[in-house]
Image (cartoon, grey):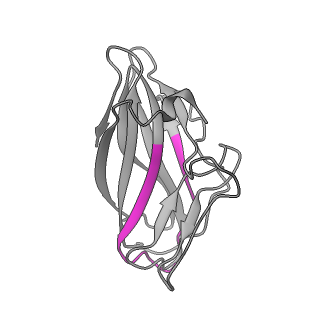
Amino acid sequence: MSSFSNPSLPTTLRSTIATLTGSNATVAVPIFRITGTVHVVMLAGVVTTVLGSNNTAAHWRLNDQTAQPVITAAAGTTLSAAGVGSSLYKIVSAGSALTLLTSAAGRFQETSSSHMDFQEFTLVEKSGANTDIEFVYTTTNTPTSGAIQFFCRYIPVSATGAVTAL
């Protein structure tokens, strides 16, 4: 367990809703902006409007306007027609896809270890550039539809460390 997982450390939660409107394209939707250095203890999303019939390769990445390192695997997860209440989580390393818990049936999810479900990670703002967490997906719908409410819980590590919803 990370030293940042100490429940006595204060965390801040940010939330934003992204409407998916891509049309036969791969789309990167900026959802949060990073300033300074932050330690993210949870990155998740909940479908608030049913997603279109073709939403694939869904993943999170960091974009500093020059480089786009992945937060979850770029091959992504298929979210096609995910229903209201379906949940997305980062619960493993950056080399793995985000996890979808569909709301098509009741779900129970637990980890195989004694650690938290969420995979923690640290992000650092690129000096002089907007540094954003983006949700990326590919669709062949023209256009696709749906909406996801995203959540980011973090601990500021630097004096300017913060996450802002976009």
- Span highlighted in magenta in the image: 42-61
Residue at the image position 69 percent from the left and 52 percent from the top: 113
Locate the N terminus and report the quarter of the image it occupies.
Answer: top right
- Residue 49's quadrant in the figure? bottom left
Any part of residue 81 in sight: yes
Q: Is residue 105 above or below residue 9?
A: below
| Percent position of residue 16, x then y | 29, 52
- Residue 20's quadrant in the figure? bottom left
Q: Which of 61 and 162 is in front in this view?
A: 162
Q: Nearer the viewer, residue 70 or 42?
A: 42
| Percent position of residue 97, x then y | 65, 55
Q: Is residue 82 left or right of residue 119?
A: left
Q: Is residue 94 above or below residue 113?
A: above
Q: Nearer the viewer, residue 128 or 89?
A: 89
Residue 14 is inside the magenta segment: no
| Percent position of residue 147, x then y | 34, 67
Residue 56 is inside the magenta segment: yes
Residue at the image position 53 percent from the left and 76 percent from the top: 80
- Overall secondary structure of the magenta section: strand
Locate the C terminus and report the quarter of the image it occupies.
Answer: top left
| Percent position of residue 92, x then y | 65, 49
Q: Nearer the viewer, residue 119 or 10?
A: 10
